[in-house]
Amino acid sequence: MTRTERSARRHDLYAVGAAILLVATAVLVGRHLQDTYGVLHVGWPPLYADWLPHLGPGTPAALVLAAATVAYGPSLAARLPWRALLASAWATATAWILSLALIDGPHRGIAARLTTRYEYLQVIDRFHDIPATLRTYTRHILIDAPDHWPAHTAGHPPAAPLTFVLLDRVGLGGGAWAGMWCVVVGATACLGVLVAVRALAGEDAARRAAPFLVLAPAAVWMGASADAYFAAVAAWAVALLALAVTGRSIGWAAGSGLLFGLTCYLSYGLTLSALIGAAVLFLGRKRVRERPVLLALFAAGLAVVPAAFTLAGFDWWEAYHLLVTRYYQGAGGIRPYGYWVWANLACTVLVVGPATVAGLRRTSALLARRPRAALARPGDADGGPARLALLVGAALCALLAADLSGMSKAETERIWLPFAMWLLAAGAFLPRPRAWLAAQAAPALLLNHLLLTGW
């Protein structure tokens, strides 16, 4: 090991130590604020969870899967054919999410999460006339409105609850089907990230990132909320754009625009995914200049979902402004910004794990040391690491913008999953991947066995 690499590893450990200190401070300060003033509205600050040490039917599977991925994940990711790698990554990610969710039991861990009084399944019967419901959707956002929507329905555009309405219409109603939809679709988010990383930064970077995307602590929340589904849609929107700007069929641009439009109608906060999309367009700017029709196709696809909902009578901007009012009518108006603006970052540390923290340190160092390398064309192997760093950096900027907005005070362990998935790709920069993968699995297992997460 060279002196430079020893220094880099030492700085990695410093970054991880600082992140652990941040989490510990958030726990201690949060516990004091909640016990003294009751203003945080979470059971185990900074997470929306309750202290409840337990085992469950998913425990053996989670332990075996974690051990197998640590032992064999890096080598398999390096040598499997690309399509087999994608299939294996999806299957392993799905199994990891399910095994963690089943630690809480089959009903409490998956089926019951989307049926609570805050969730989308509570409003299925109110969509018997979908066009009429969309026309009056904004009338029920404010908490003092007649028949106001439950928190999550009020807090999201109608594509979110409408997804579960349509599942119910095709015979897949109830919490079990809704939960499995979020798990199975959500697990493809890692594939979207891998496809984009391969297109923009090279296959080696994607293969190195794959085990970290699969064995992510984020899986604790991907099995417990619809945000896993949102994360997958956002990831594939970026992935299709990456394919379009790197010489594949420009037709992917229309599909990317369609999915970007859908993300904006799944969650207001996912408009910040535009920062990641902008990074992709920057990295593929030569292709965009050569084929301007690419942007036209993207714009055409982007217009489809907003046009459909607008014609149906739903006003996105009106709904967003009402949401801001609703947010401050509830817990958002009580939770202190001065705590959550930094405690949210502690939540993110728990979601992405220590390996990602070390990878983000290397990301920032690389961008500071070789900023011009990101200007190289996709396909140039020398610029691959810098292009990956730029992509990860764009996701981090989106997350920080969400944090500073004040509209994400608490519960960011699920709300920021669409951004966290891109941060996990920073694991590609780390040497000794097995040690770092073990460091990823440990907090996921501890959190899921010691705490009962909400939603």
Image: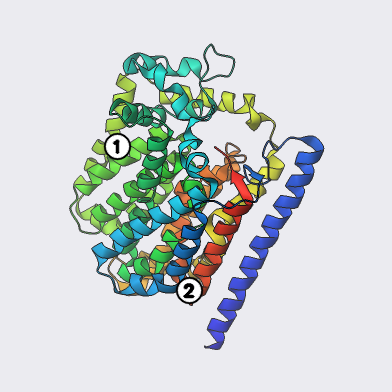
Q: Residue at x 43, y 33 (%)?
A: 175
Give the residue displayed 19% in from the left and 45% down from the top.
293
Give coordinates of residue 261: x percent, y percent. Answer: 33, 36
Q: Is residue 101 visible?
A: yes
Sequence-wise, the earlier of marks 2 and 1 is 1
Q: Is residue 118 left or right of residue 29?
A: left
Q: Which residue sits at x=49%, y=35%?
A: 112
Q: Which residue is nearer to you in this view: 218 or 139?
A: 218
Q: Is residue 369 left or right of residue 331?
A: left
Q: Residue 282 placed where, x, y %?
A: 35, 55
| SS at mark 2 in the image | helix
- Element class at badge 1: helix
Mark 2 to mark 1 CA distance (whole Å): 41 Å
Front residue of 236 and 376: 236
Residue 147: assigned label: none
Q: Mark 2: few, some, or many residues within 10 Å (few <14, many ≥20)? A: many
Residue lying furthest front = 57
Residue carrying label 1:
302
Q: Quadrant of residue 334?
A: top right
The residue under label 2 is which amino acid type?
Arg
Q: Amino acid at mark 1?
A: Leu
Residue at 40%, 55% (x, y): give it: 95
Q: Position of residue 164 (x, y in %)?
A: 37, 30
Name above or below for residue 19 compared with residue 208: above
Quadrant in which residue 298 is drawn: top left
Furthest-top residue in view? 146
Q: What label sits on residue 434 in the rendered view?
A: 2
Q: Quadrant of the C terminus?
A: top right
- Above/below status of 174 relative to 245: above
- Observer-nearest of 59 and 185: 59
The image shows a total of numbered marks equal to 2
